[in-house]
Amino acid sequence: MVSGLRTHFVHDDRLGIDLPKLERPWELIAPELQAAIIAHWEVVRGQIPDRIFRLEASIRAKQGELDAEEDFRTACRLNGEIAELASRINDLQIWYRIQQDMEETKRHS
């Protein structure tokens, strides 16, 4: 990572990606660092579809287990795990759209 870039991202274990963490307003960040932040975010953003694909595979596997499960408590646990994985997918989809939203903002200003 570019010097100073590490302080502008934090790894999110739940989502498995680095997330932006700006400690000051974007306008106060030097243009070179802004470019480095955007470049790093694009790399991270490019990993999101693969993360979603893996989470969807986990959901399918757990649904298969759930379909065959007869124990109510185990079925509830599996259902909760599926819901958590779906929540992660939703969060990743929101983060994936961040750059798209930034581009829209730049075009309208």
Image (tube, helix red, strand yellow):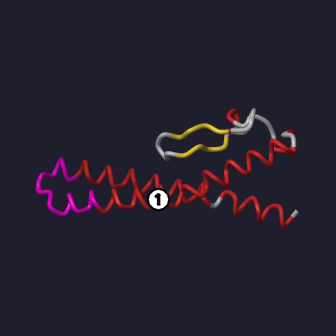
Instruction: Please provide the residue range marked out in magenta.
Output: 61-75
Q: Nearer the viewer, residue 32 or 72?
A: 32
Position of residue 39 measured from the top left corner of the image (x, y, whole percent): 72, 51
Position of residue 72 measured from the top left corner of the image (x, y, whole percent): 15, 52
- Please state the total of marks drawn on the protein image: 1
Q: Nearer the viewer, residue 53 or 14?
A: 53
Position of residue 78 measured from the top left corner of the image (x, y, whole percent): 26, 52
Q: Amino acid at mark 1?
A: Ile
Which quarter of the rendered picture does the C terminus lie within? bottom right
* Residue 73 located within the stretch drawn in magenta: yes
- The answer to which image quadrant residue 47 occupies is bottom right
In the rendered view, tell whether residue 57 sits above or below residue 9: below
Q: Residue at x 61, y 51 (%)?
A: 44
For label 1, the residue is: 52
In the rendered view, tell whether residue 55 sits above or below residue 17: below
Q: Residue at x 84, y 40 (%)?
A: 29
- The answer to which image quadrant residue 103 occupies is bottom right
